[in-house]
Amino acid sequence: MRCGRTRGADEDPATALAWVSTRERGGLRWLCPDCARRHVRDIEGKLPDEYW
Protein backbone atom coordinates (compact mmCIF):
# COMPACT_ATOMS: atom_id res chain seq x y z
CA MET A 1 0.00 0.00 0.00
CA ARG A 2 2.88 2.36 0.69
CA CYS A 3 5.96 2.76 -1.46
CA GLY A 4 8.64 2.52 1.24
CA ARG A 5 10.26 5.82 0.24
CA THR A 6 12.10 7.68 3.01
CA ARG A 7 12.48 11.40 3.55
CA GLY A 8 15.93 12.68 2.72
CA ALA A 9 17.72 15.61 4.32
CA ASP A 10 18.70 16.89 0.87
CA GLU A 11 15.12 16.96 -0.48
CA ASP A 12 13.65 20.10 -1.96
CA PRO A 13 12.01 22.03 0.94
CA ALA A 14 8.65 22.18 -0.85
CA THR A 15 8.68 18.41 -1.33
CA ALA A 16 9.70 17.85 2.28
CA LEU A 17 6.67 19.87 3.43
CA ALA A 18 4.34 17.71 1.32
CA TRP A 19 4.94 14.58 3.43
CA VAL A 20 1.90 13.60 5.54
CA SER A 21 1.97 12.02 9.00
CA THR A 22 -0.77 9.69 10.17
CA ARG A 23 -1.34 7.77 13.38
CA GLU A 24 -2.33 4.15 12.94
CA ARG A 25 -2.69 1.64 15.76
CA GLY A 26 -0.74 3.90 18.10
CA GLY A 27 2.19 4.37 15.72
CA LEU A 28 3.29 7.30 13.61
CA ARG A 29 3.60 6.69 9.86
CA TRP A 30 4.77 9.05 7.14
CA LEU A 31 3.37 9.08 3.62
CA CYS A 32 5.36 10.49 0.73
CA PRO A 33 3.57 13.12 -1.39
CA ASP A 34 2.63 10.57 -4.08
CA CYS A 35 1.17 8.07 -1.58
CA ALA A 36 -0.63 10.87 0.27
CA ARG A 37 -2.35 11.96 -2.95
CA ARG A 38 -3.30 8.36 -3.73
CA HIS A 39 -4.78 7.78 -0.24
CA VAL A 40 -6.31 11.20 0.50
CA ARG A 41 -9.85 9.76 0.89
CA ASP A 42 -8.62 7.27 3.50
CA ILE A 43 -6.91 10.10 5.37
CA GLU A 44 -10.02 12.30 5.28
CA GLY A 45 -12.16 9.39 6.50
CA LYS A 46 -10.09 9.21 9.72
CA LEU A 47 -10.74 12.84 10.65
CA PRO A 48 -13.13 13.37 13.58
CA ASP A 49 -16.63 14.66 12.79
CA GLU A 50 -15.83 17.96 14.56
CA TYR A 51 -13.33 18.71 11.81
CA TRP A 52 -16.08 18.99 9.21
Image (tube, rainbow, N blue to C red):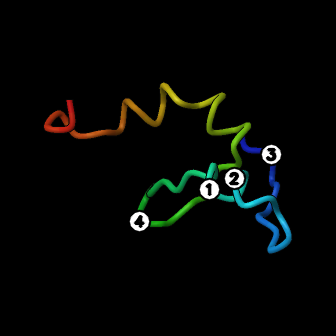
Residue 49 is situated, as x and y percent measured from the top left of the image, at 17, 33
Q: Earlier in the sequence, mark 4 or mark 3?
A: 3
- Judge depth for marks 3 and 1 and give the one in front: 1
Would residue 4 be found to the left or right of residue 18 on screen?
Answer: right
User: For this rendering, which residue is in front, 7 or 1?
Assistant: 7
Question: Pointer 1: what residue?
Answer: 17
| SS of the residue under disc 1 | helix
The residues bearing labels 2 and 4 have C-alpha atoms spaced at a distance of 28 Å
Tell me, yes or no, whether the two marked residues, 2 and 1, touch with CB atoms within 8 Å: yes
Label 4: few (<14), some or many (≥20) within 10 Å? few
Residue 48 is situated, as x and y percent measured from the top left of the image, at 22, 40
**Which residue type carries mark 4?**
Gly
Residue 37 is situated, as x and y percent measured from the top left of the image, at 63, 31
| SS of the residue under disc 3 | loop
The residue located at (43%, 58%) in the rendering is 25
Quadrant in which the N terminus appears: top right
The residues bearing labels 2 and 3 have C-alpha atoms spaced at a distance of 20 Å
Mark seen at residue 3: 3
Question: Pointer 4: what residue?
Answer: 26
| SS of the residue under disc 4 | loop
Would residue 19 be found to the left or right of residue 26 on screen?
Answer: right
Mark seen at residue 14: 2
